[in-house]
Image (cartoon, grey):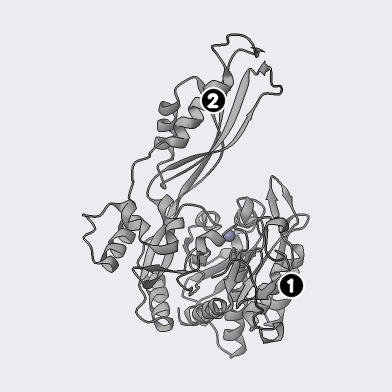
Amino acid sequence: MTTTPTSTGPTEPELDETARIARDLIRFDTSNYGGGRSNGEADAAEYVEAALRDLGLKPQLFESEPGRVSVIARVEGAEPAKPGLVVHGHLDVVPADPANWSVDPFGGVVRDGMLWGRGAVDMKNMDAMMLTAVGDILRAGERPARDLVLGFLADEEAGGVLGSHFLVKEHPGLFDGATEAISEVGGYSTFIDGRRSYLLQTGEKALIWIKLRARGTAGHGSQMIEANAVTRLAEAVAVLGRQQWPIVLTDTTTALLGEVARILDVDVHEVAPDELVLRTGTAKGFIRGSLRTTTNPTMLTAGYKHNVVPDTAEALVDIRCMPGQEAAVLAEVRALIGDDVEIETMHTDIGLETPFSGPLVDAITATLDRHDPGAPVLPYLLSGGTDNKALSLLGIAGYGFAPLRLDEGMDFPAMFHGVDERVPLDALSFGSRVLRDLLSTY
Ligand SMILES: [Zn+2]
């Protein structure tokens, strides 16, 4: 795979419906900068609303703050006794600096058999697959068995405060009767020992964002200052940044390692977990962080002049740990950095773990097998988080399943928030076929 597009792929009139919708959505610059700064999702939401209306549905728009718009539509199932399924994607994207890209990140460019642009992978691809899959079902005069709650959500890239969390808090009735959800960062393929395998995301690590604050003596930069806040802070930051956290296997990661070992034909007890994970192809980019706690320092603030020792210094650290381990990890962090440095918790979010079993998992596995026979399906724990965390507050069990069949050379995890984000056109049409099949048979 080249990183610089040279030849032109299919001309735009040849694009199938999923690619066309994904391209249109990419052309709405819905950049979410965080900290309350965003271009908003209003234009993309209106586009989705119109597409849903064309299917005969009755979409509702929810504006949590001016311009911050989510769209919800319910598809009535043929068997009301069955619990509902939420199928959701987010409409916002992380920003993109055009200077670093080979194409206009908001141009919706099609080249080399791929759709390029911010959101091609995260996650306007799935938004488009949802619209096409449901459209195919309804236009064929069919109905899904169970109610589908389709969600096109705002603000996921800033924690979903103005999207999923807003809806769950202010309009929980939208999700009445739903017990399960599918969404992003799962369903894609990776190659294990030359064998294409699909990863189903069945859990998400918990998140703790802390601020470290060291205090000391302010003074002239030429003097002997033992209590230097910058030095104290730097020591704590280095300790956390270098910390080798022990492996903690959850049910999900235990099942994953067992499956990887089976594919590699090795004894799971004889190969170290890190080594097994390194053999999961491009997916290792997502999986490596799922075996243990991570404590990554991400920001530093101190001082205001070269020859002035400041009295305080601060650092931000992004902690991700196993679901339910938050208190223990914070206690360990405290012990590691000692009492000289203060810890302030800025933001937390829960972890999730759902079983890799049950009717939905069976349906997903069977559906993938119909479209890519014999390819194994493996569970994994996501080191990051999705809107499924918000839905879990309503008791909805969330999975990551945005199906894409990818070639071996495609470094898919690198596409998330990456430069030159792009998705193969044939992966998009594969994904909508699989999703259509799943939604019409589950
Ligand atoms: Zn996303």
Q: Which mark is residue 402?
A: none
**Residue 302, located in which quarter of the rendered image?**
top right
| Residue 156: percent from left, percent from top | 62, 56
The alpha-carbon separation of the residues under discs 2 and 1 comes to: 49 Å
Q: Is mark 1 within 8 Å of ligand 1?
A: no
Left or right? Give the position of 142 relative to 351: right
Q: Is residue 436 above or below residue 259?
A: below
Quadrant where the N terminus lies?
A: bottom right
Q: Amino acid at mark 2?
A: Leu
Q: In terms of secondary structure, where does tag 2 sit?
A: helix
Quick check: marks 2 and 1 in contact, CB under 8 Å? no
Instruction: Let me know if residue 32 appears in the view.
Output: yes
Q: Quadrant of the C terminus?
A: bottom left
Disc number placed over residue 233 in the picture, else none = 2
Q: Quadrant of ligand 1?
A: bottom right
Q: Which residue is mark 1?
A: 47
Furthest toward the front, the residue is 6
